[in-house]
Amino acid sequence: QVQLVESGGGLVQTGGSLRLSCAASGRTFNFSPMAWFRQAPGKEREFVAAIRRSDDNAAYADSVKGRFTISRDNGKNTMFLQMNSLKPEDTAIYYCAARNWGRTSMSPQDYQYWGQGTQVTVSS
């Protein structure tokens, strides 16, 4: 059974940093695209960042480009999201996702596996 488990969320002040982790189990995702999405109250789930095999194949939403960095440790079947210069508008539940094949995608519908999410709250 495939499981994705996020951790690292919390409460931080504007300008602060957090590092999210997504640990995968049940299968290896070393060659599969993985991504972070987020969902704020009353809003649709939106793309944050995605990565394929390595940091060289990363994609970011314009709203986080230059502030967030996605990475992965294939040896540990784990993905990370380093979030710097956080803003109140970054407040949301952050979800990690993985897909069986293909390229990185910004569409949630393309991902077959999801974690349960971790709350990130940025106070002003």
Image: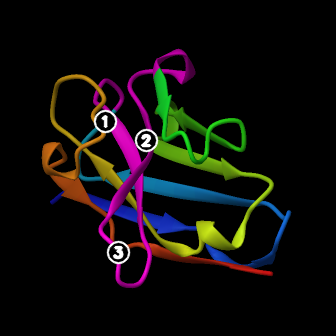
Q: Are marks 1 and 2 in contact (CB under 8 Å)?
A: yes
Occupied quadrant, residue 121: bottom right
Q: Are marks 3 and 2 in contact (CB under 8 Å)?
A: no
Residue 65: image location, x then y, percent: 62, 37
| Res 91 label | none
Mark 2 surroundings within 10 Å by alpha-carbon count, few (fewer than 14), some (14 through 19), many (20 or more): some
Q: Nearer the viewer, residue 59 or 34?
A: 59
Q: Which element type, helix, strand or loop, lies under badge 2?
A: loop
The first of marks 1 and 2 along the sequence is 1
- Which residue bears the numbered disc 3? 43
Is 13 above or below relative to 99?
Answer: below
Q: Is 33 included in the stretch rendered in magenta?
A: yes
Is 102 above or below relative to 70?
Answer: above
The first of marks 3 and 2 along the sequence is 3
Eye-nearest disc, 3 or 2? 3
Of the residues shown, which amino acid type is indicated by label 1? Answer: Phe
Q: Which element type, helix, strand or loop, lies under badge 3?
A: loop
Occupied quadrant, residue 73: top right
Residue 64: image location, x then y, percent: 61, 46
| Res 77 label | 2
Q: Is 7 included in the stretch rendered in magenta?
A: no
